[in-house]
Amino acid sequence: MCIAYLALDAHPDWPLFIAANRDEFHSRPTRAAAPWPDHPDVIAGIDCLAHGTWLGITRQGRFALLTNYRDPSALITNAPSRGELTSQFLTGHESVNTYANRIHAVADAYNGFNLIVGKLAQACYVGNRTEHGAPQSLASGRYIISNHLLDTPWPKAERLRQALDQYPLEALEQSLTPVFNILKDNTQAHDCALPSTGLSLERERLLSSPFIISPNYGTRCSTIIAVHASGRAMLSESSYDASGTLTERHDWPFLIDGIPSQTR
């Protein structure tokens, strides 16, 4: 996952909305989002190499998303997979705060990461490159995260934030296609606005758009998670090839367990 927008209790009818792009090498084997055979309450994609995930939700409303913190000068050889940070929360039963604090205690063992875990409108952010380090409970509002810290105003983050801030969440009832169209913005930033993360200028340019297209590395999928106050929920994922062409889409509607049926 390389960019994600989160609206947390920001609309009276939609307590949770996530729109995200996952960028990865096209050669890395991946399973599209679906209920996991060994944990059928979990709906998420799977990285077939490390067996973790970057984004998912459960039928109980637990969700987790992960981005890597871009810092090529500080890579740890043989560090544990960051994808397990999301999958362990999705398959576990710890509270949001308990899990975030436990991960904070072992965060230095991992390469740079940003992790948000939550249950419906409650969420917590923890990373191992933050100034203070301690997990941060997220208030109601709208957030953007890419490959730096939460709400860092990188050009790609600000483009996606501005577009989705203007999107009326009540329109989710009609179609998710406009959100996928917003996520497919491949506008690159001007050189003067590029971050300096230790990569070449050419690479910084390539990675500066919300949606990335190149032969070897790019946006593999876009994912939308939307939970209605009634308990109706959806995880929808569009997958793309190296040319940025849509190859498949999977929609997984479900009901959040524990919300009274008369409110649906």
Image (spheres, rainbow, N blue to C red):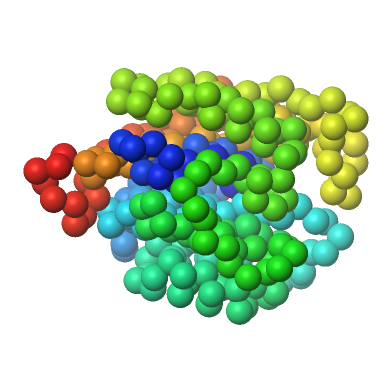
In front of the other: 75 or 47: 75
Side of 28 where 70 appears, left or right: right
Considering depth in this image, is 73 or 173 the residue closer to the camera?
Answer: 173
Estimate the x, y position of residue 203 in percent, counting from the top left. Answer: 83, 38
Q: Is 103 displayed left or right of 79 in the figure?
A: left
**For the point 39% across and 73% down, which residue is it?**
94
**Residue 174: % across, % down:** 31, 20
Q: Position of residue 47 (x, y in %)?
A: 53, 53
Query: Could you tell me which residue is drawn at 76 percent across and 25 percent down?
Result: 188
Residue farthest along the left direction in this orientation: 262
Q: Quadrant of residue 58?
A: bottom left
Q: Mark yes or no: residue 142 visible.
A: yes
Tell me what residue is drawn at x 60 percent, y 73 percent: 104
- Which quadrant of the figure contains the C terminus? top left
Q: Is residue 78 above or below residue 40?
A: below
Residue 118: x and y, percent? Answer: 43, 58
